[in-house]
Image (cartoon, coloured by chain):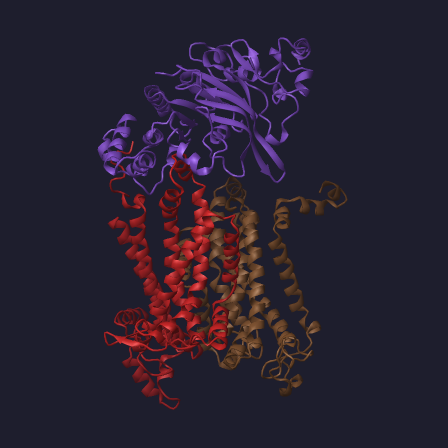
Amino acid sequence: MTDRSTSQPGWLHKVTDSDIWWSFKSSSLTVIAAIGTILIVVLAFLSPVLAPHTPFDPATLSLSDGLKPPVLLSPDGDWAFPLGTDDQGRDILSSIMYGTRLSLIVGFASVVVAMAIGIALGLLSGYFGGAVDALIMRIADVQLTFPAILVALLIDGIVRSVISVQRHDEIAVFVIVGAIGLSFWVQYARTVRGSVMVEKNKEYVQAARVIGLSPLLIMVRHVLPNVTGPVLVIATINLGLAIITEATLSFLGVGLPSTEPSLGTLIRLGNDVLQSGDWWITVFPAATLAALVLAVNLLGDWLRDALNPKLR
Amino acid sequence: MIAFILRRLLQSIAVLLTVGLVAFSLFRYVGDPINSMVGQDTPASEREALRERLGLNDSPPIQFLRFIGNAAQGKFGLSYRTSEPVGRMIVERLPATLELSFCAAVFALFVGVPMGVYTGLYPKHWSSRLMQAVSLIGISLPTFVIGILLILVFAVWLHWLPSFGRGETVMLFGWWPTNFLTVKGLQALILPSITLGLFQLTLLMRLVRSEMLEVMRTDYIKFARARGLTNRAINFGHALKNTLVPVITVTGLQLGALIAFAIVTETVFAWPGVGQLFIQSVQFSDIPVMAAYLMLIGLLFVLINLTVDLLYFVVDPRLRSQGGTARVAGH
Amino acid sequence: MAAASNNQPLLEVRNLRVEFPTRRGTLLAVDDVSFDIAPGEVLGVVGESGAGKSLTGNAIIGLLEPPGRVAGGEIRLEGRRIDNLPYEQMRKIRGARIGAIFQDPLTSLNPLYSVGRQLVETIQTHKPLSAAQARTRAIDLLKEVGIPGAEMRIDHYPHQFSGGMRQRVVIALALCADPRLIVADEPTTALDVSIQAQIIALLKRLCREHGTAVMLVTHDMGVIAETADRVAVMYAGRVAEIGPVRDVVKHARHPYTKGLMGSIPSLGVRTDRLTQIDGAMPRLTEIPSGCAFNPRCTFKGQRCLVERPNLMPAGDTRAACWLHDRGGVGAPILKETVDA
């Protein structure tokens, strides 16, 4: 290790000599998960270039290609559609690539929304204390009473009753990101609040107040770096949850519309024809979803353990 | 102890009122109740009369109190979708959901806890590592995917078990349709219960495992070893009991989650419970049903929490004697 | 007491080595430690934290925490080798032949069971008594360790006792099956200063009455001076000096022990300043070659930098220091660096 590190530039050496890197390297499962995640993300985001078909452009579809089984499992397969097609003649592989991209976008976006809401409310709550704190934390308590999926469903149901169905389909992505984001903010808020409470009474904040600097600004500068670790862990674990939640909502038919299918929507479409035995339409998207979430969860698990040695 | 329970009761009521406020706001301000009750061509004067008759012109606090009062009696008005009384719709479908959730909880507890104990005691054994890996897959698979895979294997391919519906039910007490008394009913319960319980099972297993690992490192376990106690007494007498408090907490929380996740399972298996009703009401923005469901979940959750609090007293003597005999001979 | 009626020591530790495999290599936490404890004798083991004294105690009761392990040497109890026994056989010795007392009475007791239950289960594990007989014995033990109202207190839970009372319960638990040896690991460190003396006095009295030997692990030289018959001073995993407590306190032979003795203010004598040893004990990863104490030693010579001293007779004690290598060649060079 030493002979190699001498030939590395300083920052790289710093990375490869750190405990985190060591724990990463020593867990082969984590390495596999990281590679899997990167692979899935790259394939999904390059789908317009790499995918053999554009499955949701009706002009390219032909019903005569419908319900082709996967190539390797049946002589009826067609190499143009390696994972088979659905009843409309859509290529499953291409659908999955596009669907994964959408699932990832929604997942990331909702984590960012949740993080933003949570950090902001946590800062406010911890900084002001008193009634503001009590109000925010009681809302958090009550919301925790309900599983995130239920909160997201409620928000979606409310939006639906306010706007028309057609309009809803147009802004479905934003509705779903907002709904999932709003259902996952509590953990961030609690973590940040706890950290603010600790920092608030430290001398440098008092000192900043005395010399007329905005203590809030100072705290943002000092508290946020302190909570980067825990927030990152929560975010990684929540990314898996957010992807699952989106898939579940779409599966339930209240998420993304079938004109713009995510993995969850694909699984629902496949599930409708499951009884006839055309399993590949639903199993491949389901397997992709499971692999994606598993890889993300493995990374989250590892990150939590690596940043919190006490748990090991 | 009584003070503690009273405080918990008050907190529960506060939570219920908050949930009620959300439900009421939904009910009253999201969409116009009048619009959904009358036709397009109803004249404005008639609408106004209806509005007055329904008390929609009263001040919000009075309307809220009336809403809560009605909710306490199970009156949530008529469904926008079916025009049936919402209370009756929910009562008809509640037994299906409760039986499903109960079976799922039993499955999760009686499989998950022993697995957690085993993997916590022998963390290095290959079978523990296998269970740990499988459990990670378990929490990574969304509930509906598990359901679909089970249907594919056991219903579509093997034809062993039914893939949808409750099968045969028998009426208990004239109003509670139960699955437990017929073979077909029991068969119909198997796949949905596993689907619903699997996530909680893996969660419980992982929780018990990490609690077990934590407890096994404590001084009192080391001291118990130094006293020469048998492994059996240490593992099951001392360690397991100390993991109970968090296990009870999480089991309580998860019971609430089970009922909510029943939404998904019921959709996959076309199980005629309140979850399915809720999904339909979200799709049709059937606000009264959504509001009623919200209140129901809030109530169930509060009841579960109170039960959990009482169980703490049974398990942990430190809570029992708070303010009681604790200080008799303190120093 | 039949303490020294035959010459067989109760406990013999020979060349004990305890290793900890870590990511950066294997640490030798206890290195070639040997000592005996006679029946009924109190051996004090003193040293800074990390000197390996607690690990030695844990190795004797067979409860080294993984990945720590005994890598060499022997431990014999009443002539029978116990360091390589299977878990189940060692379990029968723990509690029955060797009792243990740990540092923190607040965490040594299971909070969910009454002290009576914990006493009764320990008694019944090692003695063929009925539940009622075991309970009677438990009450007697509680009385013996000085818990007032033992008949009532037996049904109380640990949190209903104060720290000192809890440590009394822990002592009662250690005595449940009349062990021949008690390994007491910092038994008073977590307690109030006012209570420490009581607990030490209690432990000393009980062991004298029962003829139980004690290995008293502590970093408090004052406790040792009051309690022990002999003392072993540990430094960086090795025994630096061992001998009768009076001789070690009055005429310490190892420079490290001298420093330690200087650091206890003695009551009668007023000194202007407390002697302190400069520097700190080296980490296990950075033990210097030669004598481990050499970086802090004011008497060190060339030999101390290259050759590790073993215990050798030094006055009335035995010290691991080249200063006392009477017959050897090392002594004269020492003068060169005394003033350094």
Q: Which residue is drawn at 43% across and 60% down?
A: B201
Image colour for chain B is red
Figure quadrant of residue B249: bottom left
In this rendering, the count of numbered labels is 0
Apparent side of residue A132 relative to residue B3 in the rendered image (left or right): right
- Residue furthest right in the image: A7
Q: Where is residue A303 in the image (x, y as percent from the top left)?
A: 57, 52
- In the image, residue C204 lies at what x, y percent? 36, 20
Drawn colour of chain A? Answer: brown
- Would you place residue B113 above or below residue B233 in this image? below
Chain C drawn colour: purple
* Quadrant assignment for the C terminus of chain B: top left
Can residue C66 be seen here? The reply is yes
Question: Horizontally, is A19 left or right of B139 in the view?
Answer: right
Nearer to the camera, C58 or A118: C58
Residue A113 vertical position relative to residue C170 in the rendered view, above or below: below
**How far from the left and from the top, in percent, is residue B5?**
27, 53
Quick check: A138 above or below B287? above
Q: Which residue is at the front of the view, C162 or B166?
A: B166
Indicate left or right for A77 with C144 as reference.
right
Q: Nearer the viewer, residue A289 or C193?
A: A289
Q: Position of residue B258 (x, y in %)?
A: 40, 65
Q: Can residue A108 be seen in this view?
A: no
At 50% from the left and 12% from the top, the residue drawn is C272
- Relative to residue B291, is residue C43 depicted above or below? above
